Amino acid sequence: MFLKSSFTTLVVGVFVVYVLHTCWVMYGIVYTKPCDPPNGANCISPYLAEMPKLQMSIYSASQPNADGGHTLIHKEEIFDVQDKFERMINVSLPKKTRSNGTLYALVFIHQAGVTPWQDPRQVHLVAQLTTYMVPKLPEISLISREDQTKGAAEETQHQRKQRDGGPTGEGGGAATSDQLVSHWRTRLTLNIVGDHFVFDRESLPSDVHRYLRVFQNGKKMVYLPLLFVDELSNRVKDLLEINRTTMELPLTITYDVISLGRLRFWIHMQDAVYSLQQFGFTEKDADEIKGIFTDTNLYFLALTFFVAAFHLLFDFLAFKNDISFWKQKKSMVGMSSKAVLWRCFSTIVIFLYLFDEQTSLLVLIPAGVGSVIEVWKVKKALKIQVFWKGGKPTFLFGKLDESERRTEEYDTLAMKYLSYLLYPLCLGGALYALIFLRYKSWYSWLINSLVNGVYAFGFLFMLPQLFVNYKLKSVAHLPWKAFMYKAFNTFIDDVFAFIITMPTSHRLACFRDDVVFLVYLYQRWLYPVDKTRVNEYGVSYDDKPKRKTHKD
């Protein structure tokens, strides 16, 4: 017991140190030490403090260094750093870009009346207007075989054939379904630091250094405007697939002033997303992380970090106590085996559904781990033993004692009543989806139908355990430590349901579980722990032999 308590204390201690360290690192990111005094020899002053007249010019080019030509696509002749704006333009695509090529935007901030190519005090950045992704498969009606995106699919197929060597496939094989296709980024978000911050050359932040262009103006050092291209605002939902016949595409140019602290934070987040992509994260996986930062208020994002940290702690403690509970479990008295089987089935279906929807790894990986654990729980609950003979497994099921059989009777009775309501609803929903909705394949329809049944009516399968608790008038058999950690995480999941991108049905399921947990808590209050009943380890505290009374 001491070792267990020490291990939990150690985990909590490490968690506290981690949170404090992260807070210190975040403070170091958003706070920059100014130069003191401001006119010192080591100070670097802002060029914007001189209130120069500036222009913004944006060019498109097929090369990042503009070799091979460039085209002016937008110009802000009267550009005020403090005034934000949004412009919608159409950009003509060169033939190379339409043939699965790339296109870049060259953004210049330069002096008014001077072309950026001749201005020695211009600052510029290069942004990629295209990216490569596997196109989304068209969804069809499985009954009529109609395709809503028929025209677009035919054009895409024609484009891929042309790219692979012509309509007959000469010069290359047929296009594969996982072939990368050039997509157009419909948004270009630009920022400039509006603070007239004076940097200290001796303590210049490394993240800002790469964006800093400095020139000598008399005896003092001056830095040009800090221009930043916000790559985090480029979301997958805004991408357009480029077809060979597409001559021009829309582009929304958004500009806003930004603080130095926010700029440094954005640089670090952008670098973190890039590092994840280098480790194998796809564009869609990275997009889920981008959504956390771009679609969320910065202060709410800080709150989300602390919530996520506690979620991680409770996840670990719930996992530890849940494994310990089932590892030592010897009797299924008071436990609904049907609920365990259903939980196993539903977690596997949810995992397959999330995988089919190409959900973020942030959601997919925990779901996969949970599926494996639930399979192990089924093995323990049904007392299954696996023997291998000649490479073939043989399964042996254990026998139930009298108390377990009584629990099983209550469990079967509850499932009988539920089946009258559950099966017609699931079957009707599946038939409705087959007739009126569109799917990529029959497998996609099957998984979606199963998961809709799980999400919509899955909480009903948690009711047999409530029914068993009611019949036995006890909740002592439940793993309450793990249960309470999961209860905390369920309410934390409600917060994440609005932050992390996930299917709507998965989001609604988070709120559905809250109701069931509240009922469990009510039963906990209604049925106080009776030490004469067996606990979660199949042990009764009153099983110990009583001492004989002393006779006078």
Image (cartoon, helix red, strand yellow):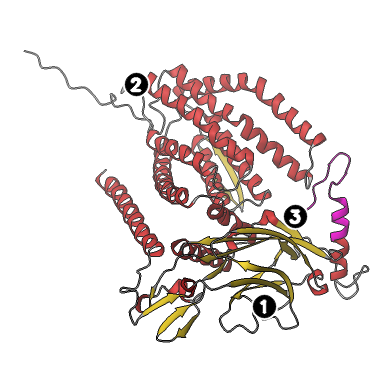
Span highlighted in magenta in the image? 136-156
Find residue 129 and name its label: none
Can you name the residue that lies furthest to the right here?
A: 168
Quarter occupied by residue 161: bottom right
Relative to residue 399, is residue 321 drawn left or right? left
Helix, strand or loop for disc 2: loop
**Vertically, is 153 above or below 508?**
below
Please name the amino acid that badge 3 sits on: Lys
Please name the amino acid that badge 2 sits on: Pro
| Quadrant in the picture for the N terminus | top left
Q: Which residue is mark 1?
A: 64
Q: Is 125 colored magenta in this rendering?
A: no
Foreground label between 1 and 2: 1
Query: Is residue 96 at least partly visible in the picture?
Result: yes
Earlier in the chain: of badge 1 and badge 2, it is 1
Relative to residue 546, is residue 318 drawn left or right? right
Q: Which residue is mark 2?
A: 528
Please name the amino acid that badge 1 sits on: Pro
| Quadrant in the picture for the C terminus | top left
Q: Please name the residue shown 47% across and 52% down the image.
A: 298
Where does residue 445 sit, x and y in percent of width and height?
A: 75, 41
Instruction: Report if the CB atoms under discs 2 and 3 are less than 8 Å apart.
Output: no
Q: Which residue is mark 3?
A: 136
